[in-house]
Image (tube, grey):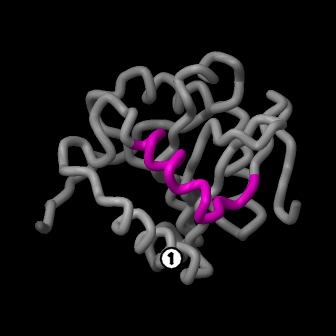
Amino acid sequence: MNGMKQLSSGAWVRPAVASDLPRIAELLEADALGPAGGLPGPSADGYARAFEEICEEPSNELWVATRADGDVIGTLQLVFFTTLSWNAARRAQLAGVRVAESERGQGTGSDFVRWAVERARSKGCRLVQLSSDKRRTAAHRFYARLGFVPSHEGLRLVLQ
């Protein structure tokens, strides 16, 4: 299949397809903080609309990790952009990283994030950034083990 790569953990990475959406939504909604940290989850139509928009933007990529049998066990999104700040750096924003609870501790998540970092490097990025809710202390330890460092205080304004 086009775009597939096997990770050292045995999982495979490939671009997400529309038929993956129910499983991706399940992974996002299984999160302890919910899909948006307490906001109501989108409908199936909302996920479908977002998926179409992601697919239409060349700088926006949605990926899944699968077992050899094709079962989706993880997902992440990469958004590429260029800024004038940080010496006019091209950056990648890593978002929506989720790995099935049954797969945690087996190296799948680490391999998947390392793969995403290499994907960003291959696209000319000088920086990979992500945000993680302050309550996700286990996630912060996970990212620290992969070399990510806390560098900014994140702020948001929810528009409803």
Q: Write the residue at 84% across / 55% down.
A: 4
For the record, the magenta segment spans 14-28
Number of marks present in the image shown: 1
* Residue 23 is inside the magenta segment: yes
Vertical relation: 74 (above or below) 129: above
Most frequent secondary structure within the magenta stretch: helix
* Residue 17 is inside the magenta segment: yes
Q: Write the residue at 80% across / 43% down.
A: 12
* Residue 45 horizontal side relative to residue 14, left or right: left
Q: Amino acid at mark 1?
A: Glu
Please tell me whether mark 1 sits on a helix, a strand or a loop. Answer: helix
Check disc 1: other Cα within 10 Å, few if <14, some if 14-19, many if 20+. Answer: few
How far across and how far down the image is residue 89, in percent? 56, 71
- Residue 147: in sight, yes or no? yes
Given residues 59 and 88, the one toward you in this image is 59
Dividing the image into 4 quarters, which one contains the C terminus? Answer: bottom left
Vertical relation: 126 (above or below) 149: below
Residue projecting furthest to the left: 160
Residue topped by disc 1: 52
Dividing the image into 4 quarters, which one contains the N terminus? Answer: bottom right
- Residue 89: in sight, yes or no? no
Given residues 126 and 6, the one toward you in this image is 6
* Residue 114 horizontal side relative to residue 6, left or right: left
How far across and how far down the image is residue 25, in percent? 44, 48
Vertical relation: 107 (above or below) 26: above
How far across and how far down the image is residue 32, in percent? 32, 28
Q: Write the residue at 21% across / 53% down.
A: 155
Given residues 86 and 104, the one toward you in this image is 104
How far across and how far down the image is residue 50, in percent? 42, 70
Vertical relation: 101 (above or below) 67: above
Q: Write the residue at 64% across / 59% down.
A: 16
